């Protein structure tokens, strides 16, 4: 059997070697126990440091190490897709290079997958978000809660890309050719029975996170628009609601003027209504534009990544 381990990297020069050593150490017992070979597929997502050079050096030391270097930063989703495209394994694993995903979990996940033949995937989820900023962890919980209620897919709170799955599931994910990819949603959308293991929060081994709060917020909104049309329904409902409110207000002021002879306060009322309705219109146009932009990018049919160097 062959296990392909995909490791997306972006400016991870200080983490490549510790990550490799941690994975190699935990894959070794599996080789003797299950006659399992492994390939480590590092995908350099257009790093600006010496990550590519380190991967080149590592591949000369260990023939199991494969690497792909992008021409620029295409994003983690493209890196995962590239790794899946080149993976030859009967089983495929995805793990981050920064050691926040413990390599020691690989053997645990793989053994669980083999022990329970009804499973096609074993995924890891975090026990807690202790150590993260409160606002970041709060929004993360809110995102998973919201996705479970506005879309057809069910995402486990704390789940991510850290998982091992079968070749059959990998082929199903690759069959989804969309340009705007959201792997957390894709794993749930393709189905297959998934088992779960839990792992504690861990700090990065070195370097700083590439995911700012605004980037995570944008990424979560991409996930929502990729798997739910509820925002469009909300914008339509808001339009109908404000039409109804405007009719009620018009009748109220007309009757008030006829019955009590009171003059209607024009300027403040007019400004408030214009700002409110104008803001609502821009909000609804923004939602519509987000869906339209996704359609526009899909129709261009651009490649998801461009490779400048590889040892495949």
Image (spheres, helix red, strand yellow):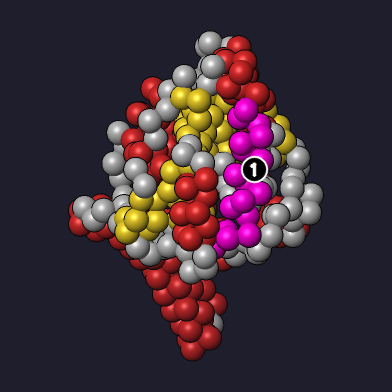
What residue sits 36% from the left and 47% below the top?
311
Q: Main secondary structure of the magenta part?
A: helix
Quadrant of residue 104 within the rendered picture: top right
What residue sits 61% from the left and 22% below the top?
30
Looking at the picture, how far across and down is residue 274, in whole percent? 44, 79
Q: Is residue 295 left or right of residue 90?
A: left
Asked if one can make out residue 194 in the rendered structure from this viewpoint, the answer is no
What residue sits 43% from the left and 62% below the top?
46
Residue farthest to the front, as pictured: 61
* Residues drawn in magenta: 11-28
Looking at the picture, how far across and down is residue 21, in whole percent? 64, 43
Query: Magenta stretch containing residue 290, yes or no?
Result: no
- Determine the secondary structure under disc 1: helix
Asked if one can make out residue 94 in the rendered structure from this viewpoint, the answer is yes
What residue sits 47% from the left and 48% below the top?
60
Query: Magenta stretch containing residue 23, yes or no?
Result: yes
- For label 1, the crowd category at 10 Å Cα-Cα, with few meaning under 14, some 14 to 19 and many 20 or more, is few
Residue farthest to the left, as pictured: 300
Q: Is residue 31 above or below residue 251?
A: above
Quadrant of residue 294 within the rendered picture: bottom left
Residue identified by numbered label 1: 21
Looking at the picture, how far across and down is residue 35, in whole percent? 54, 16
Total labels drawn = 1
Looking at the picture, how far across and down is residue 81, in whole percent? 38, 44
Residue farthest to the right, as pictured: 130
Q: Is residue 149 above or below residue 111?
A: below
Q: Is residue 47 left or right of residue 129?
A: left
Quarter containing the C terminus: top left
Q: Is residue 83 above or below residue 166?
A: below
Which residue is at the front of the view, 223 or 262?
Answer: 223
């Amino acid at each position: 059997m062959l296990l392909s381990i995909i490791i997306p990297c972006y400016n991870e020069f200080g983490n490549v070697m510790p990550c490799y050593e941690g994975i190699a150490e935990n894959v070794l017992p599996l080789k003797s126990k299950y006659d399992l070979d492994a390939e480590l597929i590092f995908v350099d997502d257009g790093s600006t440091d010496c990550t590519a050079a380190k991967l080149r050096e590592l591949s000369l030391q260990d023939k199991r190490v494969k690497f792909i270097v992008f021409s620029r930063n295409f994003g983690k989703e493209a890196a995962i897709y590239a790794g899946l495209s080149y993976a030859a394994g009967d089983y495929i694993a995805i793990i981050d290079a920064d050691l926040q995903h413990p390599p020691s979990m690989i053997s645990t996940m793989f053994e669980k997958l083999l022990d329970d033949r009804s499973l096609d995937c074993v995924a890891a989820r975090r026990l807690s978000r202790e150590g993260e900023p409160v606002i970041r962890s709060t929004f993360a919980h809110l995102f998973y809660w919201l996705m479970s209620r506005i879309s057809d897919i069910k995402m486990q709170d704390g789940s991510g890309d850290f998982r091992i799955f079968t070749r059959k599931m990998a082929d199903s994910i690759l069959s989804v050719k969309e340009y705007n990819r959201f792997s957390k949603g894709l794993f749930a959308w393709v189905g297959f029975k998934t088992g779960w293991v839990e792992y504690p929060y861990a700090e990065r081994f070195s370097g700083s996170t590439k995911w700012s709060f605004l980037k995570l917020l944008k990424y979560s909104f991409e996930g929502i628009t990729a798997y739910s049309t509820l925002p469009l329904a909300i914008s339509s409902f808001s339009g109908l609601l404000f039409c109804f409110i405007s009719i009620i207000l018009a009748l109220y002021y007309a009757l008030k003027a006829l019955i009590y002879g009171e003059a209607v306060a024009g300027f403040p009322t007019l400004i408030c209504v214009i700002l409110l309705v104008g803001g609502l219109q821009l909000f609804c146009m923004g939602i519509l534009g987000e869906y339209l932009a996704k359609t526009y990018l899909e129709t261009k049919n651009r490649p998801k990544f461009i490779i400048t160097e590889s040892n495949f």
